Amino acid sequence: MEDAALRSLLRDLQRLPFQREGKVSVLEVLLDYLEIVAVAAGEKPSHLQGQGMRSRSLLEGIEGIAAAHGLRLLRTGVVLQHFHRAPNYDARFFDWETQRERAARAREGQVLWVYRNPDLEPAIRSAADGETDVAGALGYPACCVREYNEIGIRISEAVVRGYQTEHGATELDDFIRLATVGAKVTIPPSAKPHVSHLFSYVQFSPCRRCAESSSSPAAEINWAMKRLATRLSPAFQRAIDKAVSAEVAFRKQQGRR
């Protein structure tokens, strides 16, 4: 798309009214708009809307505008976690967890993928089903996605250890019972994610190596997205910077509590 068409798309997105369902932050909304325009500009393969905290009115509004501007749309179930390795605990419990996640997914609302290239659809479906990670479909650095997935696996392993050490679980039935009732366990700090740097213009969490380098794959994507935002509208770019400052201040406040 030409810049004029991209600006028209951005203006339509910015006019969207939406309710704050799921506590959607201002920064999340602005970056959603930037990612969708990046898809239209051919700088990003696809955008995923509705994973995690979601606003139904925003999702439906984005769907209508994206279609009106000639972008392709695909609804899938909530994206399942991809496991690049099996967790280090009883495989039978892991199988039970996997089946429970798939059953829960069937009860949840769908997510929306916005993309341009029809050949991308198989990669999107594979990522949505957890068969592959989302790096290729969303254009995120593979290193960052892998580290994010590894954190999820380590947390699962820490939960199972908690079932053992804090609740005395030894048999498969014990683990299933504790997981079913949502038994509380202590997660050690070493298993929790550590974000050392917030890139202002991307929605994925950078891995540690990317966060520490101004020329990393994540940093390059961040700068490309900033350039696009500035090219589209300096006011839009400043709004993102303002929202980032508010988000950083909020996270610091939460950390002090």
Image (cartoon, grey):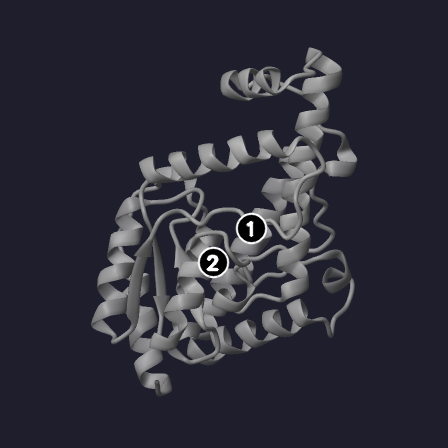
* Residue 59 falls left or right of residue 162: left
Query: What amino acid does circle 2 point to?
Result: Ala
- Between discs 2 and 1, the one toward the N terminus: 1
- State whether residue 224 is above or below residue 158: below
Residue marked by disc 2: 127
Q: Residues within 10 Å of mark 1 (few under 14, many from 20)?
A: many
Residue 174 picture location, percent across and down: 61, 15
- The C terminus lies in which quarter of the figure? top right
Would residue 254 appear left or right of 24 to someone viewing this image? right
- Element on which disc 2 rests: helix
How busy is the neighbourhood of tag 2: few (under 14 within 10 Å), some, or many (20 plus)? many
Residue 257 showing in the rendered view: no
Q: Nearer the viewer, residue 131 or 185?
A: 131
Element under label 1? loop
Q: Are marks 2 and 1 in contact (CB under 8 Å)?
A: yes
- Rendered image: mark on residue 82: 1
Spatial separation of the CA atoms under disc 2 and disc 1? 8 Å
Q: Which residue is at a point 30% across and 82% down the rendered structure image?
A: 5
Q: Residue 104 at what x, y percent from top left?
A: 39, 34
Relative to 124, does residue 69 appear above or below in the rendering? below
Q: Residue at x 73, y 64 (%)?
A: 210
